[in-house]
Image (tube, grey):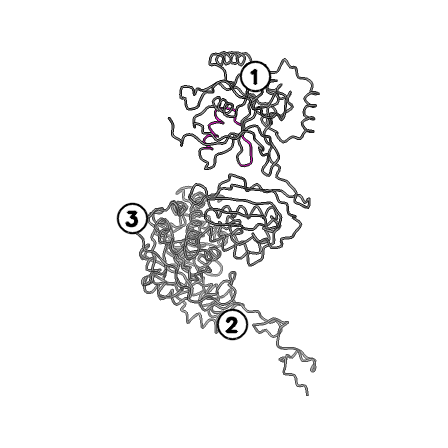
Amino acid sequence: MSSSEDKPRLYLCSGGKWAAGVDGLDYVEPTVRKGVRLKINSTFKHLVNYCCWKCEIDRSSGQVHICYKHEGQLFQITDDEDVSVFLQYANGLEDPPEVYVDVYVSGEGDGAGTSNTINEEPMYLDTESQIQQSHETSYRTDFGYGLSDSYPEVVPETQQDQQQEVQEEEDEDEDEDEDEDEDERRKFFGCAEDEAHVLDMGLSDEEDEENEEDEENEEGVEPSRLRPGLDDYFGIPPLIPTPDVSTEDSEGVPYRRSQRLSIGKVFDTKEKLILEVGMKFIEEQFEYKTKKSCTKRYEIACARDHCKWSMKAKAYGGGGMFMVTDLVDVHKCSRTQLNPNHRHANQRLLGNFFKTKFRNSRRVLTPKDMAEDFREQYGVTIPYATAWRARWKAITLIRGSHAESFTRLPMYLYNLERANPGTITSIRTDSSGRFAECFVALGVAIHTFLQNLRPVLIIDAAHLKGEYLGTMFLVVAMDGNNNIVPVALGVGRSETADEWTWFLNKLKTCIGEPRGLVFMSDRAASINAAITAIFPNAHHALCCRHLVMNVRSRAPRIKKFKTPYWKACKAYTTRVFDRMMNLLQTVVPEGAQLMQEVGVERWSRAHFPGQRFNIMTSNSAESINALSKCARKLPIVGLMEYFREFQQEWYFLRRRKGGLENINILVLQELNHQLTEWAQKKIHKRIVKSATWTAHGIGYDKWEVRDYGYNAEVDMHHRNCTCLKWQVSGLPCGHAITVAKRLGKNDVFYLVTQPYYMAELYKATYHGVIRPVGPAETWHYPQNPIPTVHPPLIIKRPVGRPKVNKRRPSRGESRSQQKCPRCEEYGHISSQCPWIPSSARGSSQLEPIGTVDLN
């Protein structure tokens, strides 16, 4: 015999009637109600026999109808598959479900069940020999699935076999006309092809009469074309229609009922249940109050007095799940009462509602935007403070809290190294285990810089804007197409010499000290000290953009002479540099003096001891800082993941392009070389500029080129020119291009002296791939436990409202000032000028306000 676990419990109900209830139709006033157990492998035939025997139903009085209710919907049981699904469903419930068994007399649309005793002993489900599969035949009508008279009536086995054989012969005769008969049958019942299985049980008496009249008046259908015995299925009870979600309140104001809740619906956690309830009440414009809330039960009711709306839920199946056990989903209160600030539109609900919109950290969604979007969608007004807290709640749900992020950082970096071989990461903590600094360099980026990029590194720092303030350290390089390539990233507490030294020391373990290495940065003393200590053989160049901004703080007039300043910075020869500096010395002597004090060898290309190519500013690092403006508000793991994500995207897109998409590729006819787009444009400009120049021979491979302003000497054998542009940039200058034309060359791309601009090397730059780390649930854990990192201490909270949109100036940099057109002084505009014309003298002489003699 089978165990009790294989026999689901259920209640058999019969002899009742259907009435409109809160949750659709309810089966009320049953005359028979019995608790039974059924075997899990029972068939439909045995279920019908057992139900008729248990409920004392005479099957000869009409058709047997069996159904059950789940989540407010009625499900009819018509075959073995339906029985199997129902028993599996019932076996997983704590409370036995109800099964409704009735007999409907043919021709009666709402027949009532009759109770007659069956004299014959039914086949018990526990008898294994008596459980046999039966042939099923069902037909679709406008009421639903009908059952033939021969199935599943309790008759001797031989008679069942005879009836089955007769039915099979009839089915075989009609196979050829099946499609035609199906169309005629649909026409007879007046239902569309996709609606032939729809069941309608909610018809009123008047609608029933109208349907009967339509069937009587229908023309064009011959009874002989119908299936034999089809008229036996009239009167089968219809199923419940799709519930109408529109209803009215006590004042007659219509509203659309939300379908977020239903009896039997299971939620993974109580938190999710509360969120669904909150969204339901916001959609319906009602409010609720909590009557009981604990780890086992959750009961709420409408906040309005005398309203019958209520819901009960209880813990289900362990693991924190909750199931709705009782629901009265009809409000008797009025919706005309205003809810200007909805009590359930709190930061928890709004945070869950908006969290998907914060997955992209580059998207800016302000609290004001959130409140406006929610008001337009649901008509609920949200205070700005609530929207602000909801915004941080949403970010926390997506990225985690700032404090927890420091704890997760070691595991994230460990899995980052596993996913991307060659990656080097490091974390430094203080004596108490609190975070001090971290370093991350992807293996692909390290290999790319050492093998394919110019040996120039641009370094910079940017301030973090999250809960824990700090500094982000960044190292980038430039590829042959002049694109930005991030090399390393770090986070520290402040921009000090000690932290820069630790960061650059970790960078040195990744790249070593390549020959001719050049660092580009601003004038920060901490950076200069760290580079001198860690990379003594490297050259340190200053950003010309930061330099001019520093000079403006002491010599504002240099703003009018930007052209000679930039020509002095970018000059390839000392002759051009000296001419521009003499001009600046004349017009802005204080600015020229400051530029001399800084050291011309650090910012002038003509005096720089190394090779900085065409890189004159740190704008590439500043661009990454601007790109990460919103990401710098995220927790530290979110910040690291943000950089990994956009590097992965950049490598993928540039690898697909190969630097050659939508580019007019210039191919050498003999050597078949290709250049990147940026290099092609540079050379094209020099070709146009040198179109009128002339070349004159001097000796073997030596030429004089006259450019109507400066005569240069070109050595084609050693690939150099006295203008120095060819040697410094690696691309042929206009003088070399003029000589190539004189020699009858069809192209000049073979004159490129540096391989960084070749398309093949550009493709190799992005040959590697950057792989994702994956969600925290899939992370790998090392055998040896990783030390826990605690968040740093917040020593002092900044005063005032956080300023999130203003860039902080670099050290020594001054902000631009307004200049008054009246007095030509800085710091104010004309409407605020402290000087006014002297009307007494009738002249344009200015006098300060407050100095007029009243005597």
Viewer-proximal residue among 748 and 473 = 473
Q: Which residue is mark 2?
A: 587
| On screen, residue 835 above or below 281 | below
Q: Which residue is mark 1?
A: 178
| Secondary element at tag 3 | loop
Which amino acid type is shown beneath numbered disc 2? Answer: Val
Q: Which residues are magenta?
A: 71-90
Q: Which residue is mark 3?
A: 783
Viewer-proximal residue among 488 and 376 = 376
Viewer-proximal residue among 767 and 272 = 272
Quote the CA–CA distance across marks 1 and 2: 102 Å
| Secondary element at tag 1 | helix
Q: What residue occupies the far bottom of the structure in this picture?
A: 855
Quarter of the rendering occupied by the N terminus: top left
On the image, the x and y values in percent for residue 332 come to 64, 45
Which amino acid type is shown beneath numbered disc 3? Answer: Gln
Quote the CA–CA distance across marks 2 and 3: 69 Å
* The stretch drawn in magenta includes residue 6: no
| On screen, residue 405 above or below 102 | below
| On screen, residue 162 above or below 635 | above
The answer, for residue 664, to whether it is visible in the render is: no
Q: Residues within 10 Å of mark 2 (few under 14, many from 20)?
A: some
